[in-house]
Image: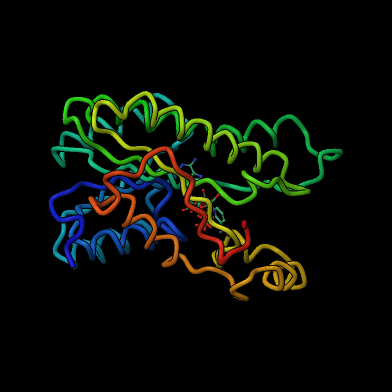
Amino acid sequence: MSLLKGKTAVITGAARGIGREIAISMAKEGANIAFTDLKIDDNMISLEKELNAMGVKAKGFASDASDYAQTDEVVNEIQKEFGSVDILVNNAGITRDTLLMRMDEETWDMVIKVNLKSVFNFTKAAQKFMLKQKSGSIINMSSVVGVSGNAGQANYSASKAGIIGFTKSVAKELGSRGIRSNAIAPGFIITDMTAKLPEDVRNEWIKGIPLRRGGTPQDVANACIFLGSDLSSYVSGQVLNVCGGMNT
Ligand code: NAP
């Protein structure tokens, strides 16, 4: 299919995990892909090669999504090289899990900066081009714990809840200019991020999922294709749970 043909998708933190799958899946739908990650490493180089071999234009950019100036610079560069920014997927994220009683200021600040400020940075930098185009789809990676909260993840949950408020505000602010803004709230998705959890904790999570399995990066990428494409042209300001029924 070619649901995204002719569109440029910008995906943050895409060298591995969910972001990588989003990049590959969007390229399969014909999108040109500009992706970022912290550094140029084997993951970035191999993804760039894989995408280019699929016949779309693709390039990886080393950039810290939590840095305002770096973000503005990289989005300007992408616009220059690709000619448009049609889809923005704010995917970069980290966890630094610990109970509140042990959480220091640095751990709090780091998670808020990487997960939440990065969404502001990229949306702010991309909106100027989307406003000129009078179109755009912004997809922000929240989490089910941004809706429900989670013990040991006060920083992460707060950052993901903040993303939801931001997403809805942007939808209201920019809707009249043809720009849509939605969030995805993945549940328990099998990536490096969740592989860090002890096996018994992972099994406990899976037991609580109505569909009785962890999600795959592809499950999340499929939702991104829907929100990035014209199939969702009347969908904005929403949080789409991709969680196997966990958040119902
Ligand atoms: P992951 O496997 O840990 O990958 C995260 C990616 O983000 C990595 O490529 C990482 O780069 C990059 N990154 C980290 N900090 C960055 C920064 N400051 N600037 C640019 N890139 C940065 O995580 P994931 O599981 O794919 O998660 C992707 C998104 O989904 C995150 O926002 C996460 O919170 C969200 N999510 C995940 C789950 C889940 O179960 N996995 C559930 C709900 C929501 P490096 O390789 O350099 O570290």
Q: Could you say where residue 77 lies in the image, as x and y percent from the top left? A: 23, 34
Figure check: 28 above or below 14: below
- Figure disc tally: 0
Picture quarter with the C terminus: bottom right
Q: Residue at x 65, y 43 (%)?
A: 156
Residue 155: quarter of image: top right
In the image as oriented, which residue stretches furthest toward the right?
A: 101
Figure check: 98 above or below 190: above
Between 234 and 28, the residue placed more toward the observer is 234
Figure check: 234 above or below 42: above
In the image as oriented, which residue stretches furthest toward the bottom?
A: 212
Color scheme of the displayed model: rainbow
Q: Residue at x 37, y 38 (%)?
A: 181
Residue 212: quarter of image: bottom right
Left or right for 155, reference 220:
right
Q: Residue at x 52, y 37 (%)?
A: 164
Q: Could you say where residue 20 lies in the image, as x and y percent from the top left? A: 39, 59
Q: Could you say where residue 163 lies in the image, as x and y percent from the top left? A: 52, 36
Q: Could you say where residue 203 lies in the image, as x and y percent from the top left? A: 72, 73
Picture quarter with the N terminus: bottom left
